[in-house]
Image (cartoon, rainbow, N blue to C red):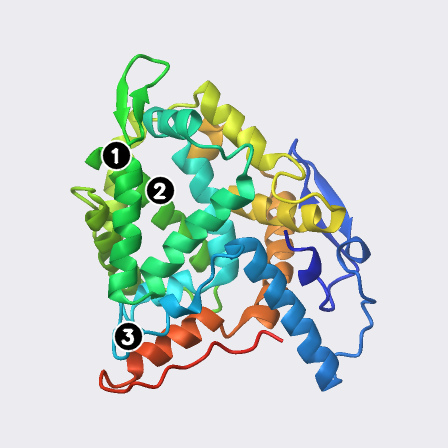
């Protein structure tokens, strides 16, 4: 996934965890097609590297689905949240969203009915990158797109949910449009996104800002049909305590966890696989202890935790170097701040 990201000077080696939880060293020269001594002081080389990182990340995360027209119009439209929102801040932090997204997939798998729907109706095993692109596109357009684009994306998902129904292996019926299942998926996702931001962003949110984030992002879940959505950090914690007796590691969940942790799930070349291994380890590290135990993930040692977080921070530096400021956010901010009567449209920045 991230092979071509790693063209920025990094430590010669770092530590991460193998699938059994043991610490192992990764050589940076496996991750970089360019010499680590590359003279980044040369402006044209620096720009070329940034462009290469940006193109690779955007192609992997969004595929061919990143249409900047969804973000640069209409003038004066803040979308569902707007530039000063906590949603724009949290969802704009790429390292936090990568690790938080992995954590969210793992946590969501613990709900037997939600996992049954995924297992019986999703082709994530055959087309994992397409599923990644679809999820990333939905989160991006509902966060930063104009209001009409965001509402259209939500309407499309609701139509898809109408066909995701069935019977779980334990005999219980499920329906993707069930407000309770939608609440679970939303809370599991957003609490992991915030956990990633709090761990890896330059400045973690205050308690009041975390409350603002959950209050804002609840709008998306409620538009999707979720009910009784938590609007604060305290309400999220209370909900997770309440729902825990309903969670279990089913056969489908165990298979999904193994799939996510398998080398080469999203990528095939060794360098990209090593980078993805770092992100997966970082996502596992974000999970609460009870979720890791229920998912039967390896127990972390102090050394292992330190190694994982150091590796993610090193990779985060590469992501920030190549992808900030975000083209999507730059385009969306310009749209939101232009007077509504202005007809001029801006083009997205050239990624290099």
Camera-nearest label, 1 or 2: 1
Residue 232 in sight here:
no
Q: Are marks 3 and 2 in contact (CB under 8 Å)?
A: no
Residue at left offset 31%, top offset 53%? 153
- Residue matched to label 1: 162
Does residue 338 lie above or below 13 as drawn? Answer: below
Q: Pointer 1: residues within 10 angstroms few (<14), some, or many (20+)?
A: few
Tag 3 or tag 1, which sits nearer the N-term?
3
The C terminus appears in which quarter of the rendering?
A: bottom right
Q: Nearer the viewer, mark 3 or mark 2?
A: 3
Spot occupied by residue 324 in the image (x, y as percentages of width and height): 53, 72
- Residue at the image point whose x is 34% and y is 13% from the top: 170
Q: Which residue is mark 3?
A: 74
Cβ–Cβ under 8 Å for marks 1 and 3: no
Most extreme residue toward the top is 171
Q: Is residue 36 visible?
A: yes
Look at the picture and state if 204 lies above or below 179.
Answer: below
For marks 1 and 2, give the CA distance.
Answer: 21 Å
**Few, some or many residues within 10 Å of mark 3 (<14, 14–19, 20+):** many
Residue designated by label 2 = 188
């Amino acid at each position: 996934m991230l092979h071509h990201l790693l063209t920025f000077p990094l430590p010669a080696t770092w530590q991460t965890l193998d699938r059994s939880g043991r610490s192992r060293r990764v050589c940076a020269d496996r991750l970089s097609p360019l010499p680590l001594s590359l003279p980044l002081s040369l402006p044209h080389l620096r720009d070329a590297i940034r462009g290469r990182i940006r193109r690779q990340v955007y192609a992997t995360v969004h595929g061919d689905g990143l249409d900047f027209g969804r973000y640069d119009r209409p003038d004066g439209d803040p979308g569902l949240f707007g530039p000063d929102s906590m949603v724009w801040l949290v969802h704009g932090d790429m390292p936090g969203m990568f690790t938080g997204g992995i954590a969210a997939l793992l946590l969501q798998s613990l709900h037997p009915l939600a996992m049954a729907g995924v297992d019986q109706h999703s082709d994530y095993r055959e087309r994992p990158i397409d599923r990644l692109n679809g999820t990333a596109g939905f989160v991006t357009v509902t966060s930063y797109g104009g209001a009409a684009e965001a509402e259209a994306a939500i309407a499309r998902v609701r139509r898809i949910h109408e066909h995701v129904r069935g019977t779980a292996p334990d005999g219980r019926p499920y329906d993707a449009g069930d407000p309770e299942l939608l609440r679970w998926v939303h809370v599991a996702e957003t609490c992991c996104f915030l956990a990633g931001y709090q761990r890896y962003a330059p400045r973690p949110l205050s308690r009041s800002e975390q409350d603002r984030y959950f209050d804002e992002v609840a709008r998306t879940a409620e538009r999707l049909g979720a009910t009784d959505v938590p609007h604060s950090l305290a309400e999220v914690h209370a909900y997770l305590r309440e729902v825990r007796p309903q969670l279990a590691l089913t056969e489908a969940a165990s298979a999904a966890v193994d799939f996510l942790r398998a080398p080469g799930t999203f990528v095939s070349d060794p360098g990209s696989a090593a980078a993805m291994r770092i992100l997966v380890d970082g996502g596992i590290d974000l999970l609460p202890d009870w979720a890791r135990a229920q998912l039967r993930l390896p127990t972390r040692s102090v050394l292992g935790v330190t190694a994982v977080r150091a590796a993610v921070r090193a990779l985060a530096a590469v992501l920030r170097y190549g992808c900030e400021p975000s083209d999507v956010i730059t385009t969306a901010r310009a749209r939101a701040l232009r007077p509504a009567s202005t007809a001029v449209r801006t083009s997205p920045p050239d990624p290099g």
